Amino acid sequence: MLGPRAVMMRASLRARLS
């Protein structure tokens, strides 16, 4: 279900929250 785009988006959101 989690595609490469979802992973990239998740990493980006995590970096912003960090």
Image: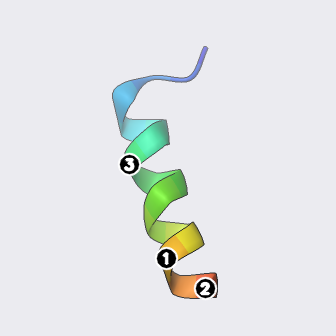
The numbered dot on residue 18 is: 2
Write down the quadrant of residue 4 in the picture: top left
Distance from disc 3 to disc 2, alpha carbons, whole Å, reads: 15 Å
Q: Which residue is mark 1?
A: 15
Write down the quadrant of residue 2 in the picture: top right
Asked whether the residues under the numbered discs 2 and 1 touch, taking CB atoms below 8 Å apart as contact, a structural biologist would say yes
For the residue marked with disc 1, what is the amino acid? Ala
Return the x and y of residue 15 as percentages of the image width and height.
Answer: 49, 76
Return the x and y of residue 17 as percentages of the image width and height.
Answer: 63, 84
Asked whether the residues under the numbered discs 1 and 3 touch, taking CB atoms below 8 Å apart as contact, a structural biologist would say no
Who's the residue at 55% across and 70% down the image? 13
The numbered dot on residue 7 is: none
- Residue 11, above or below 4: below
For the residue marked with disc 2, what is the amino acid? Ser
Distance from disc 2 to disc 1, alpha carbons, whole Å, reads: 5 Å
Residues packed near mark 1 inside 10 Å, few (<14), some (14 to 19) or many (20 plus) = few
Who's the residue at 54% across and 54% down the image? 10
For the residue marked with disc 3, what is the amino acid? Met
Q: Under tag 2, what secondary structure?
A: loop
Report the quarter where the C terminus lies: bottom right
Q: Is residue 14 left or right of residue 9?
A: right
Return the x and y of residue 14 as percentages of the image width and height.
Answer: 58, 69
Mark 1 or mark 3: whose residue is earlier in sequence: 3
Distance from disc 1 to disc 3, alpha carbons, whole Å, reads: 11 Å
Q: Which residue is mark 3?
A: 8
Who's the residue at 44% across and 23% down the image? 3
Mark 3 or mark 2: whose residue is earlier in sequence: 3
Name the mark nearer the viewer: 1 or 3.
1
